[in-house]
Amino acid sequence: ISAYALGVVVGAPVLAVAGARLRKRAMLIWLMLAFAVFNTLSALAPGYASFTLTRFLSGLPHGAYFGVSALVAASVVPPHKRATAVAWVMMGLTIATTIGVPAASLMSQITGWRSAYLLVGLLSLATAFAVWRKAPPSPADSAASPLRELSALRNRQVWLTLATGAVGFGGFFAVYTYIASTVQTTLGGSETAVAVMLGVAGLGMTVFNLLAGALADRHLNASAFFCLGLGTLLLLLYPTLAASGLWPMALGLFAICVLGGISTVLQIRLMSVAGEAQQLAASLHHAAFNVANAVGPFLAAQVLLAGYGFPASGYVGAGLSAAGLAIYML
């Protein structure tokens, strides 16, 4: 997982800049073909070192692919529907995580772990074909260049938006990472209960992502306050709910998924502030969220090591969410 996440962080800016002159549909196809190849190589890896390398390589196309996908989705709808279109792109990632990860885990138990990566490779090929057949042709941009994309790095608002995601969304990961431990260790729940909780989180992410997208189409800043502000308050309540039983925990978990909508909100904000460096900014957004995936669990782990129970991860999450909101307001 760490190798893949590192690949996302490295690959997002590098590939976004390197592919600046490519038409967006062509770039999506090439990125997905690369994803297919590297995941297939993961399935064929003969040892741990080669497997780690292929997982790093598999992560390289991730950020650029989702960033460019968001730009394409936003380009085919009226301006007042951009956030909703991006929300549907992000929902695909949520569904893949909620359904795909458990399905791959089950498949690995039945047919071996290599089969799961082979399946990902096949699905990636199918996705590349679907993009080729269905994605709208992208007009050529004669002014596009790597140098123009790099101008995003001189934009203060781009950095603040990325920092909002890296810190604020870390609040969600601080809790999400320890769902299984909270269910089984704190509440004595079964593996089935863990699966149900993960499903609840997936449902919450889907619902609030679409809701945040609809709100962002009307008022972008209000949607950011909705996700991060309300998320902070709900995270403060989560420890009490998570320690009270499975049903209260499920309710609290669903509620804190309001933070999930911030992904769409920040993607739209980047489109608004990045100027002509759209591709790099959109891709860096997904690198920032992988940073959040590392920061949140790490800080929550420090609280756990200090002797507090797993539900206390909610307090860490609240602090990160509040910090993200503060950064957004700068």
Image (cartoon, grey):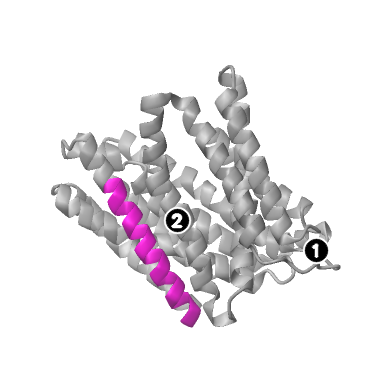
- Numbered badge on residue 148: 1
Q: Nearer the viewer, residue 32 or 252?
A: 32
Q: Position of residue 278 (x, y in %)?
A: 69, 65
Residue 309 visible within the image: no
Q: Nearer the viewer, residue 197 or 230?
A: 197
Mark 1 lies on a secondary structure that is: helix
Quadrant of the rendered structure where residue 215 is?
Answer: bottom left
The residue most toward the front is 133
Mark 2 lies on a secondary structure that is: loop
Residue indicated by mark 2 = 169
Q: Position of residue 163 (x, y in %)?
A: 55, 58
What are the residue bounds of the magenta stretch?
Answer: 197-218
Circle 1 crowding by C-alpha within 10 Å: few under 14, some 14–19, many from 20 = some
Task: First in sequence, mark 1 or 2: give its number.
Answer: 1
Spatial separation of the CA atoms under disc 1 and disc 2: 28 Å
Circle 2 crowding by C-alpha within 10 Å: few under 14, some 14–19, many from 20 = many
* Residue displayed at 67% across by 48% down: 31
Q: Nearer the viewer, residue 45 or 311?
A: 45
**Which is closer to the viewer, label 1 or label 2?**
1
Q: Is residue 132 left or right of residue 264?
A: right
Magenta portion: prevailing SS class? helix
Q: Does the magenta run of residues contain 213?
A: yes
* Amino acid type for the residue under numbered disc 2: Phe
The residue most toward the right is 142
* Amino acid type for the residue under numbered disc 1: Arg
* Residue displayed at 85% across by 68% down: 143
* Residue displayed at 41% across by 41% down: 101
Residue 17 visible within the image: yes
